[in-house]
């Protein structure tokens, strides 16, 4: 039962991270919302190609991300409720998607409201990254940055076929593949859907995360009452 919950949580969290990160990168001038350090690479590239003042705006993602991490840590210390904290990611993404719809209707693609919407997405991904760290046992591994998961999967695959031919090592390989496939599926979906609908697409991962955690909370309530 617990293993099933970890499997679903892992693939949903990885899918949503890939979806959101690719969507903002595709639509919002190369903004990484989950893989936040990628914005340094993008900024350095733009700096070497005659950067404009607007190119500095994405650097706001760093203080926003840091504030999200700090607040999540404080809330976790006080309430220790992983499901509700994760559900708040979904709510923020839904609000971002609704705001994006409003902005799209009025052809607004710059200014305070537009960048505020982008920072709301970054804030949500800050919570997402924090949940991975604070509740690491609830997922198979990191769900926002796949470099470490790819490295682990390759090393585990090598060890499995050389010196550690065990069921545990095979299980670890499968867990890494769950995270990688979920993230890749999110990246592809995010790129295709956001290219067509813009950041209104945030409604998809938002509703998915909110619904999944609402079901988990309800299920936990029923178990406690029985």
Image: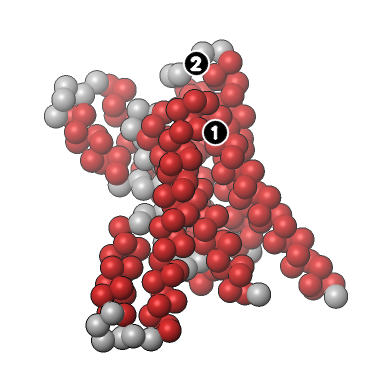
Residue lying farthest to the right in this orientation:
226
Q: Residue at x 59, y 27 (%)?
A: 99
Q: How is the image coloured?
A: secondary structure
Q: In this view, does 102 lie to the left or right of 19?
A: right
Q: Nearer the viewer, residue 140 or 81?
A: 140
State which quarter of the image contains the N terminus.
bottom right
Q: Image quadrant of residue 213? A: bottom right
The residue tagged 1 is 201
Q: How many circles with numbers are drawn on the protein?
A: 2
Q: Nearer the viewer, residue 223 or 153?
A: 153
Q: Residue at x 32, y 36 (%)?
A: 59
Pointer 1: residues within 10 angstroms few (<14), some, or many (20+)? Answer: many
Q: In the rendered view, would you say 179 is above or below 186?
A: below
Going by the image, does 46 lie left or right of 200? left
Residue 73 seen in the current view: no
| C-alpha gap between disc 2 and disc 1 | 16 Å
Secondary structure of the residue carrying tag 2 is loop
Q: Badge 2 is on which residue?
A: 108
Label ID, residue 70: none
Residue 108 lies, in percent from the top left, at: 50, 16
Residue at screen point 38% across, 86% down: 166
Q: Identify the residue at the far left of this view.
A: 48
């Amino acid at each position: 039962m617990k293993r099933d919950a970890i499997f679903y949580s892992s693939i949903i969290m990885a899918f949503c991270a890939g979806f959101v990160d690719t969507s903002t990168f595709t639509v919002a001038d190369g903004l990484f919302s989950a893989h936040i350090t990628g914005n340094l690479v993008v900024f350095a590239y733009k700096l070497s190609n005659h950067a404009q003042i607007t190119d500095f705006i994405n650097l706001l993602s760093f203080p926003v991300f840091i504030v999200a991490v700090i607040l999540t840590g404080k809330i976790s210390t006080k309430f220790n409720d992983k499901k509700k904290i994760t559900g708040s990611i979904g709510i923020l993404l839904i609000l971002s998607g609704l705001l994006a719809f409003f902005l799209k209707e009025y052809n607004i693609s710059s200014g305070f409201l537009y960048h505020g919407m982008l920072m709301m997405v970054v804030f949500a991904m800050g919570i997402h990254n924090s949940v991975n760290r604070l509740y690491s046992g609830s997922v198979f591994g990191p769900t926002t940055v796949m470099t470490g998961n790819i490295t682990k999967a390759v090393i585990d695959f090598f060890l499995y076929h050389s010196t550690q031919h065990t069921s545990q090592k095979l299980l670890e390989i499968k867990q890494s593949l769950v995270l990688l496939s979920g993230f890749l599926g999110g990246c592809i979906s995010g790129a295709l859907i956001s290219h067509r609908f813009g950041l209104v697409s945030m409604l998809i991962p938002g509703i998915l995360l909110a619904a999944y955690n609402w079901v988990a909370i309800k299920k936990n309530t029923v178990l406690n009452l029985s």
